[in-house]
Image (spheres, rainbow, N blue to C red):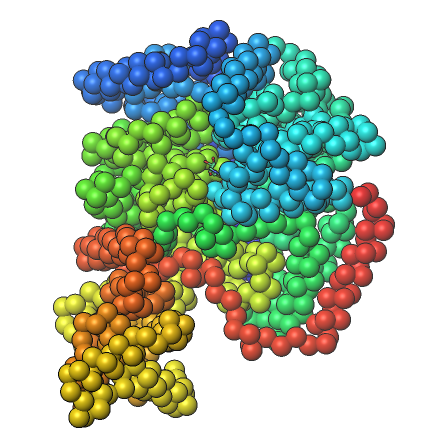
Amino acid sequence: MSNKNSELESLSLAGNINIWSENQSTLEEQALKELQTFAKELNTAEDGEITDDNEKVDEKEDKNFSLNVESYIKQQQDLKKRQDFQRSLANDTIKSNNNSKKRKVRDDSDLEDKSGSEYVPSDDEDSDPSYNYVDEQTVITKKNKRKECTLIEKTIDDGDCKSYKARLDLYYKLLEQEEESSEDDSKDVHTVQDNLKIPYKIWNKLYRYQQEGVKWMWNIHRKSTGGLLGDEMGLGKTVQVIVFLHSLHHSQISSCHGRFVGLGPTLIVCPATVIHQWVKHFHEWAPEFRAAVLHQSGSYKGDKNRLIKDVRKTKGVIITTYQGVIKYEKYLTEHEWHYVILDEGHKIRNPATKATQVVKSLNTPHRLMLTGSPMQNDLTELWSLFDFTNPGMLGDLKTFQEHFIEPILQGGYSNSTYAQEATALSVAGALKDLIDPYLLRRTKHQVQRHVSLPNKTEQVLFCSLSDEQKALYKDYLLSDPVADILGKGVKNWSGDHGVRAKVFVAITKLRKICNHPDIYLSDGADEESLRFDYKSSGKMVVVSALLKIWKKQGHRVLLFTQGRSMMEVLRRFLDRQGYKYLKMDGTTAIGARQPLIEKFNTDSSYDVFLLTTRVGGLGVNLTGANRVIIYDPDWNPATDTQARERAWRIGQDKDVTIYRLLTAGTIEEKMYQRQVWKQLLSNKILLDPRTNKFFKSSDLFDLFSLQENADNAPETVNIFHKSRVRIQEKLKRKSKPKRPEASPKRRFTDEKLLEMKHMAHRIAKSLSKPPPESADRLELEREKRRRREETDEAKRLEVAELRRYNREKAGIVEDVHANKIDDRDALVGFSEALEYAETTARLHHELKTNNKDLDEIADEVNTAKETVSKEPEKLIKKFKKRKIDLTGKIDGEKIEGLVKTETKKTKNAEKDKNNASNKSGGEDDFILGKLFNKKGVSGAIQHDSVVQETSKGGSLRVHTEAQMRAEKSLQALKKSRLDNWKW
Ligand SMILES: Nc1ncnc2c1ncn2[C@@H]1O[C@H](COP(=O)(O)OP(=O)(O)OP(=O)(O)O)[C@@H](O)[C@H]1O
C-alpha cells in the first residue's frame, strides 16, 4: 500500500488544494476497492516490502542464475576463453531466436500482465518474479520454465568463504606478478592529515574532487559524527566510499577506544538492483575485502546469521537491501558495526517506514549516507536523512516542522508576502549553514573540469493527445467520479482518506489515457480485443519518430516508463517495429539485473533498453546509451532525474540527449509543474536559499481540466517561457526571414557602448600605426624589422588584451544571436566594436607573420572603419547570422585563434569538441524540427534552465524581523536537541 500512500502524499503536497464533496459512500467504497485491488495486484510497496512468497520465487530464480564456486574459480583462471565462447553462443542463440520469433510472440502473450494492475507505478525493486522475461532471448514463465540464460554472467560475491579465498589467492598472485614486472614502488602511500594512508596507486586513480571526498569522510570520522555524501549521480560516490574504507583498513588506526583497528565490520544497505554492482566495485577498488551479499541472490546459501557472524569475524563487509535489514533485523541489530553505510539513502526519507526505523536502530558509531537526491519531495525527508547520519542534530520532527519547514514553505509560494519571503530566506539560510558541515554535494557542473563529461541536453516535449485520447479524456472529466470529486464540499481533502482515494483513482485513469488509450480501456475489458496501436497515443507517435531517427544516427536509447502495463505496450511496439531491446523491471530477478546491464553496455547491437523508472533508474550505470526518453512523469522529481542520470555519468563519452515527454494540457503538465516546485524547494536548501519562488497554489479544478488550446501553447511553456526552445521560431524564420521587432529594452548603457567603441579604436590604433608616407621599400623593411624586434612581452600583452576583449564581445554577440538584444543602437555599437577588434586582430597576426606589409594593413584598417560607419545594417546582419558561443568562438572558431602559434595545441582539441557539440546540437535541432512539423509536439522547454532559475539578488530584502525569526528557529532547535539528547 505504500506505493499508493506515496502517491497520495504527493498529491496532498500539491499545494493548497480545496475540494468540495459529500460523503457519498458508494463511490468511496468503489474507489477504496479499486485501491485494494491495485495493492493486491502490485504485490509490492515503495520501500520494497515483499512477501515471503516473492522471496521464495526470487530465491529460486537467483539460484538458477548462480554459478557454483568451483566453476567460478575456473572461470577466473580462464575468463577470456569463456567470454569468447559465450560470444559465439550469443550469436547462435540470437540466430535461433530470430527463427523462433513466432513462437516467442505466442509466449509473450503468456507474459502479459493480465491483472490490469497498472497504472500503479512499479516502483518496487523486489517485485514478484512470478514471471520473468530477462530479455527477448531469455524467457522464463511460471508455466514455461524454459530458460536460455547461459549468456548471463554475474559477479560472484564473497559470501561463500571458498570462493572468497580463491579470489584472494588469484588476486595476490596477480599482484605479485605485477610487482615483479613493474618498476614503480607501488607500496608508496599518500597520507591525509598525518595519519590516513592510501596507496598512491589508488589515490592517483581518483579525480581531484573524489580525493577531497575521501578527506571529508576522514574529517567526519575523526569528529566521530556521520555525514551525507550527496554528489550528483554518477560522480563516483561508491568509489569514494570504498577507497575511504580501504584507507582505514590500510592505516590500521585504532578507534572507538580500541574496539576497532583499521576497518571493523561494516554494513552496506542499498537498493536490490545495485547490490552486485557494489560487489563489483569492491572487487575492483578494494579486492582484499570480503564483500558478502546478504540476500537470496548472494552466493551464501546457508543460515544467514552464520554468514553475518562469519563476515564480522573477518572484518568484512555485508551488503544487503532495505528489505534485508527488515528481514534480518534481529541478527543485524544484535551486533556493533564499525560503519553503517546507506546507499541511495533517500530510501529512508519517510521517517515512519519500517526500514527507516530499523537502520536508525543499528548500533554503530559511524554512519554514512550516499544519495544524489538528498531531498525529493519535502523538508521532512531531509530531516529523516540527517536523523540517521547525525541523530538529533535537527531536533525532533515536530520542532523542525514548526520552526523550519513552515516558514520556508510559506515564503516559497508565488502569492507569499514580502515578509514571508524574507523570513523563508533567513530560515533556509540558517538551515543550510547547520547542515553544511555534514553534507558534501558536488554537481557535475562544478566538477566538469575534472571529469570532462560530454554535453548533455535535456528537453521537455509537449505532445498532443490523439483524437481518441482527447475524446476519452473529456469523457472522463465529465464522468460521475470526477463530478463527485469536484462537486461538493470537503475542504481539506488531503486529510480525508476517502476523498484522497477517489482523487488518486481519478488521476490514475487520466494518466492511463495520456499514456495509451488502450491501457485505460483495458480496465476490466478483454485485452485481446485491443490492438495497442502506437498511433492511438500522441506520445507513442513521438517515440516512434525519435527511435527511427536515432536508429539511423546510430544512437542507443534508454526508454523509461513508470508502470508495467505501459512497458508491455512499448515492448510490443518495439517487437513489431523490429528493434532489438532488453528489458528490466521489478519482475526481473535481482541476480539477473547486473548481468543485463553489463550486456546492454557491452553489446552495441541492442537499440533500446526498456526500463521501469524506479527499478532501472536507481544507482545503475548505463553508459552504453546516449539517448534517454522519459515516457511519463513521476510526482517525485528525483525519480525522473535519477533515471536520466544513468547515461550521463563517468564513463560516458558521447553527447547525451534526454527527452521528457508530457501530454500537453493534461494532468501530466500539472505533475511536471509540481516536480519543478519540489526541485526549487530542494535547491533552496541544498544550493541557494535565494532560489526563486514562482509557483501558484493549484486546486483540484486545475488538476481535473483539459487545456483545449494546449497544442498551440502548453501552459507550462508559458510559465517557463524563458526556458522555451525556440525551434518553431527558427523554423518559421527559415521559411520567411523577418526583421526582429525592436525590443523596448536597452541592454547596454550609452557609456558602455562608448567604452566598447573606444576600446576597439584603441586596439585598432595600437596595432596598425600607418607607415610614413615617404618611406621607400627599404625603409619599410627596416620599420617592419624594428617592430618585430619589440619585446615579446609587449606582444603578449596585446594578445592578452585582445583575447579579453574578444571574450567579452563573444558574450554580447551570443545575446544578439539569441535575439536577446534587439536594440538597434546596441547592435550598431557592438558590431562596430567587434568588426574593429576582429579586423585588427587578424591584421596584427598577419603583421607578426609577415604576410602583409604596413601599407596593406593601413588600407585594410581604413576600409574596415568605412564599412562600419557607412553600413552598420550590413554588419548587424553579418553578426546576427554567425554562431557564437560563450567561450569566445565564432562559427566554431576562436577569434583569438588568429594568433595561431600560441593556441595551436589546444585549438585542435577545442575545435574537435566544438564540432562534436555543434553536431549534436544540430542533430537535436533537426529532430525537434521534425517533431514540431509533423509529429504532434507543440512545445519544448529546456529542463535545466527551468530548475536552475534563482531570483535576482535585488528582489529579496532580508528584514531584521526575518533574521530574528531564523534566530528563533535555531533557539527552538537547540532546546529540542537538549530535550532529546541522543548524539
Ligand atoms: N576515479 C574513477 N576512475 C574510473 N572510473 C570511475 C572513477 N570514479 C567513478 N568511476 C566510475 O563511474 C561510474 C559511476 O560511479 P558510481 O556508480 O560510484 O557513481 P554514484 O555517484 O554512486 O552514482 P549513483 O548516484 O547513480 O549511484 C562507475 O562506473 C564507476 O566505476
Q: Nearer the viewer, residue 892 or 47?
A: 892
Q: Position of residue 475 (x, y in %)?
A: 33, 51
Query: Viewed as shown, does residue 139 lie left or right of 536?
Result: right
Query: Viewed as shown, does residue 24 lie left or right of 669?
Result: right
The number of numbered badges drawn on the structure is 0
The answer to whether any part of residue 391 appears in the image is no
Q: Position of residue 167 (x, y in %)?
A: 53, 15
Q: With respect to residue 175, does 540 lie above or below?
A: below
In the image, farthest residue toward the bottom: 774
Quarter placement of the C terminus: top right
Q: With respect to residue 716, does 604 lie above or below?
A: above
Q: Residue at x 59, y 22 (%)?
A: 288
Q: Residue at x 25, y 46 (%)?
A: 546
Q: Position of residue 816 (x, y in %)?
A: 30, 75
Quarter placement of the N terminus: top right
The answer to whether any part of residue 586 appears in the image is yes
Q: Residue at x 70, y 44 (%)?
A: 193
Q: Quadrant of residue 907?
A: bottom left
